[in-house]
Amino acid sequence: MSTRTAKYTALTALLALGLSACGNGDTGEAIPEDQASFTIGVANEHEAHRELARIAEEELGYEIELVNFTSYPEPNPALAAGDLDANWFQHIAFLAEHNVASGDNLLPIAPTEIVPLTLYSNEYEDVSEFQDGDTVAIPNDPVNQGRAINVLVAADLVVLAEEIAQPEPRHVDEEASTVQLQPVDAAQTVNALQSVEGSIINNNFAQDAELDPLNDGIYADDPSDPSAFPYINAFVVREADVDNEALQEIAALYHDDRVLEIMAERSNDTSVPVGDVTAEELQEALADYEDALRDGDED
């Protein structure tokens, strides 16, 4: 389901107490050029995070402290406050939502991967089998909700009344659409699958439920499509640190084969590494998405 084009296949608890003192602490000041110890925020820490930190320490000489978060809204405020030097957990669309809502200007410095968002069904084996009036559960947080709706648009199950970067249920033309939407908490999309005809489930929750996106999923967005660009995951820093060479070097380790192998295994080979997108391209896409969100708020 995840076609890998040349562009994307080149490389094919809460905030912990006592954050490291190596956090800059002043959002206006750049990290010193000679700093060799870094605090990196991650979400739901796993083996790939630890492997990247190990390589950075043992082969590049950087001391890495991973700070684990179990709530996605927390790593960005911690970075903006200077309690972290970087974070590694989010895609461009999520970052744009944070920046627009908070007034921060956190920026991506290196791409990592795209993970397709998948539609599952216990009733059907193909999207063509959905009937008028069927219900599909989708995550209810703004970013995942918008992406899920776009997945259903691509699957010809939903029609939008107007084009918008991050659609909401109110933007759906219900009469022209095949399915109805049932927004639920993202963590409940697996449970919802038992009572609706389909459910769009984030990869981490699918993994917890032992769902295989390739074998159990019936449709997913295409990581190679230009519309997927905002869902490229990235290492993110404060504006003052976008040119920090040490952080750039650490972020580039994501594409070390040892890290990629772990990520492929964790995602059941659905994770698509993105290695040939520049920081400037990521930042331009972020700015465009932020503008689109602001324009949407004005409607």
Image: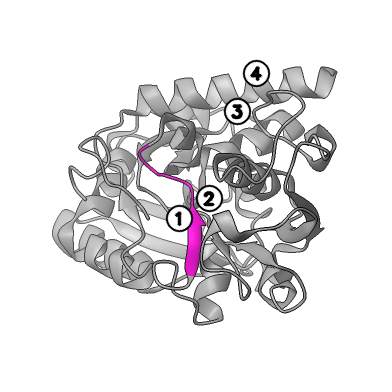
Task: Report the Cα–Cα distance between label 2 and label 1.
Answer: 5 Å
Span shown in magenta: 217-224
Residue 32 placed where, x, y %? 38, 35
| Type of amino acid under label 4 | Asp
Task: Report the Cα–Cα distance between label 3 and label 2.
Answer: 15 Å
Q: Is residue 39 found left or right of 95 in the rendered image?
A: left
Q: Which residue is mark 3?
A: 105
Magenta-drawn stretch contains 130:
no
**Looking at the image, is 160 positioned above or below residue 126?**
above
Q: Is residue 58 found left or right of 290 in the rendered image?
A: left
Disc 3 and disc 1 in contact, CB within 8 angstroms: no
Q: Which residue is mark 1?
A: 39
Task: Report the Cα–Cα distance between label 1 and label 4.
Answer: 30 Å
Residue 125 placed where, x, y %? 52, 68
Residue 84, labelled with which disc?
2
Q: Is residue 29 found left or right of 226 in the rendered image?
A: right
Disc 2 and disc 1 in contact, CB within 8 angstroms: yes
| Type of amino acid under label 1 | Thr
Residue at horizontal 72 percent and vertical 32 percent from the top: 160
Disc 3 and disc 2 in contact, CB within 8 angstroms: no
Q: Nearer the viewer, residue 250 or 214?
A: 214
Task: Report the Cα–Cα distance between label 3 and label 1.
Answer: 19 Å
User: Going from the N terminus, do you reach mark 3 or mark 4 first?
Assistant: 3
Residue at horizontal 65 percent and vertical 18 percent from the top: 291
Specify the quadrant of the image occupied by residue 209: bottom right
